[in-house]
Image: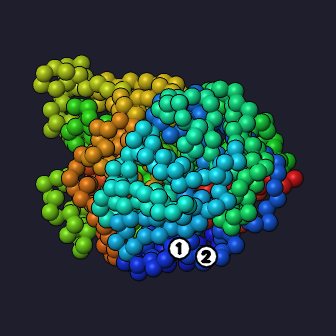
């Protein structure tokens, strides 16, 4: 087993996290932009520090996916598109370096300009930038893309567009966006928007799901497609960006292929047999005892552990508080007590990975133990009436004795349910004063075998309390559609979080997103305290205020008891074909977006 460590990443992170200070006004367009402070790399940087510029070109990588797909438009609500479409065939004005908390460098744009207040941003396109059909990327394409995504695209694009007061071409290759309000992050968000070719949608409805490939400017184009079963992306030999410094050492494969299967067990067997070339293992117990098969022993498969320095994020079972049953926080608290983490963790993962303590745990941005103090308390105090027990006083998840009975926590759960008006009848079934049963369903994506095992254990414990719990399994398309419409009681949620939380927090748990279809606010959070902490986070100009706002937000999210937290891994565990290689220098985000397949290469 190989284990790689970041080179100088800890020092870089330490420096990055003291960057939230008011930046000097940019006197002229720059090669990059950071959320706080200045970009770490100079204008003439040769390559990203985590990339290997000497990586050989060629070969292919094959991934296995669970589910299917029925669309090649990843920017709308309709249909399910393969992840690789957006990742590999489209580009943005700026590209993110994952060895810095939130810094971006020029891609389609050769420069970016803004001011100290960041109430506007101007991008200047590279003259050589081209779509895959050879046509130039124009200011008109940029403006059309921003407006179309912001109005007809997925709701994740709408919030940023609503903050644009005007956009105008300021030159043959430059475009300026003026904002309705000061927004430190908006220049970076606009820099990340995918740029589409306007001409291809003349006479074509952008909102219609289609299997017709969309023309992009990225390193790959859509290759052979078997709808719902497989898709290949082939490297464009005429890709305009091949010599760009940002891309040196990236996009090294001739082909990136995704094969789709009914469940994860089938995908793993395909990996064991060599049909799939990479497997990302999320279960520590399986990593310890299921990777001694013949191809590992022969050296054909290599086991690599990739460290990271990012927050734990939140993985768990999320309550839909739009449902009357879960609107009462005492019910949610009861069900958190009823989840026997220590027992479930031992069965599923061997107890190897720690529990997620809060949304930003494992980082400087996470809430601290004990009562809220100092600036964190000052931020929260005006919203005391909107805070649940533990936000100010201190909060920790319940801990069981590890036995299957979980008696102490089950008693606490029963007491909380009784306080909320749920008592067992003569048959032991929970009912409220109107005689209605305590009934709900856990929604599960087809093929999620590990989550099914977790839900089965949990549901049995809840039935002992008197709850009527069912598990509903649906295919990938139905699952996506139901999440977009919030048509579930409880489901599995994975929410990855960065070292530079920003405007995406509104989509994750802002009140304005609670009833807007297609946002990431699965729990239906509507709390003025959350909104205020997000606002404080986004308007911070000093390190102390930024960190305090993040910790205060973390306290409210955690103590609002929206999720039954599971565990997180402090490393990513990747089993892969020995011919797949990656650089020794690991970015601070580790195995994150921009790591595989972008930085990997094939070497026989």
Q: Is residue 203 above or below residue 404?
A: above
In the rendered image, the vertical position of residue 504 relative to residue 55, given as above or below: above
Q: Nearer the viewer, residue 329 or 503?
A: 503
Depth check: give the residue in front, 537 or 378.
Answer: 537
Q: Name the spot of residue 395 as percent of width and height, x first.
A: 28, 58
Q: Are marks 1 and 2 in contact (CB under 8 Å)?
A: yes
Task: Report the residue at 76% width, 54% height from top.
Answer: 252
Q: CA distance from mark 1 to mark 2?
A: 8 Å
Residue wearing tag 2: 43
Q: Which residue is mark 1?
A: 30
- The secondary structure type at the circle numbered 1 is loop
Left or right: where does residue 260 sit relative to residue 391?
A: right
Residue drawn at (53%, 30%) of the image: 203
State whether residue 177 appears in this view. Answer: yes
Q: Residue 194: x, y in percent?
A: 54, 49
Q: x, y percentage for residue 132?
A: 69, 46
Q: Secondary structure at mark 2?
A: loop
The quarter of the picture where the N terminus appears is bottom right
The mark total stands at: 2
Q: Specify whether 554 is left or right of 219.
A: left
């Amino acid at each position: 087993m190989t284990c790689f460590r970041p080179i100088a990443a800890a020092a870089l992170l330490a420096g990055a996290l003291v960057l939230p200070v008011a930046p000097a006004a940019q006197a002229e367009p720059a090669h990059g932009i950071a959320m706080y402070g200045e970009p770490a790399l100079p204008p003439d940087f040769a390559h990203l520090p985590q990339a290997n510029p000497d990586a050989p070109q060629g070969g292919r990588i094959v991934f296995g996916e669970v589910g299917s797909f029925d669309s090649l438009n990843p920017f709308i609500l309709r249909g399910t598109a393969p992840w690789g479409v957006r990742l590999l065939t489209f580009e943005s004005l700026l590209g993110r370096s994952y060895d810095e908390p939130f810094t971006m460098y020029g891609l389609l744009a050769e420069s970016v300009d803004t001011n100290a207040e960041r109430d506007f941003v101007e991008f200047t396109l590279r003259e050589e930038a081209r779509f895959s059909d050879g046509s130039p990327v124009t200011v008109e394409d940029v403006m059309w893309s921003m407006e179309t995504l912001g109005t007809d695209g997925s709701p994740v694009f709408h919030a940023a567009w609503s903050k644009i007061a005007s956009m105008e071409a300021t030159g043959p290759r430059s475009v300026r966006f003026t904002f309705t309000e000061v927004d430190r992050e908006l220049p970076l968000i606009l820099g990340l928007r995918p740029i589409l070719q306007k001409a291809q949608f003349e006479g074509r409805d952008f909102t219609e799901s289609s299997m017709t490939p969309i023309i992009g400017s990225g390193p790959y184009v859509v290759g052979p497609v078997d709808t719902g079963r497989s898709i290949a992306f082939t490297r464009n030999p005429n890709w305009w960006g091949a010599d760009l410094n940002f891309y040196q050492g990236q996009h090294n494969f001739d082909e990136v292929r995704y094969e789709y299967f009914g469940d994860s067990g089938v995908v793993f067997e395909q990996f064991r047999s060599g049909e799939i070339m990479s497997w990302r293992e999320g279960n520590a117990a399986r990593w310890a005892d299921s990777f001694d098969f013949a191809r590992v022993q022969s050296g054909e498969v290599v086991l690599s552990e990739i460290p990271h320095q990012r927050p734990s994020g939140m993985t768990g079972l999320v309550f839909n508080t739009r449902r009357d049953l879960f609107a009462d926080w005492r019910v949610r608290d009861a069900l958190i007590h009823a989840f026997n983490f220590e027992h479930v963790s031992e069965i599923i993962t061997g107890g190897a990975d720690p529990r997620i303590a809060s949304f930003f745990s494992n980082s400087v941005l996470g809430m601290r133990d004990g009562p809220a103090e100092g600036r964190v308390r000052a931020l929260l105090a005006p919203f005391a009436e909107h805070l649940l027990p533990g936000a100010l006083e201190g909060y920790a998840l319940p801990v069981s004795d590890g036995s299957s009975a979980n008696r102490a926590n089950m008693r606490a759960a029963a007491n909380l349910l009784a306080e909320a008006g749920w008592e067992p009848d003569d048959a032991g079934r929970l009912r409220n004063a109107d005689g209605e049963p305590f009934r709900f369903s856990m929604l599960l994506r087809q093929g999620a075998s590990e989550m099914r095992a977790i839900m089965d254990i949990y549901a049995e414990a809840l039935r002992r309390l008197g709850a009527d719990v069912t598990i509903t399994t649906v295919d990938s398309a139905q699952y996506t559609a139901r999440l977009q419409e919030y048509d579930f009681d409880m489901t599995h949620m994975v929410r990855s979080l960065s070292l530079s939380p920003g405007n995406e927090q509104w989509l994750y748990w802002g009140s304005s997103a609670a009833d807007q279809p297609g946002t990431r606010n699965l729990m239906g959070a509507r709390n003025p305290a959350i909104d205020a902490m997000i606002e404080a986070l986004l308007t911070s100009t000093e390190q102390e205020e930024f960190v305090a706002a993040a910790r205060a937000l973390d306290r409210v999210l955690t103590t609002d008891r929206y999720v039954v937290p599971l565990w997180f891994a402090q490393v990513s565990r990747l089993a892969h074909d020995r011919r797949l290689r990656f650089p020794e220098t690991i970015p601070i985000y580790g195995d994150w977006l921009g790591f595989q397949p972008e930085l990997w290469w094939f070497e026989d």
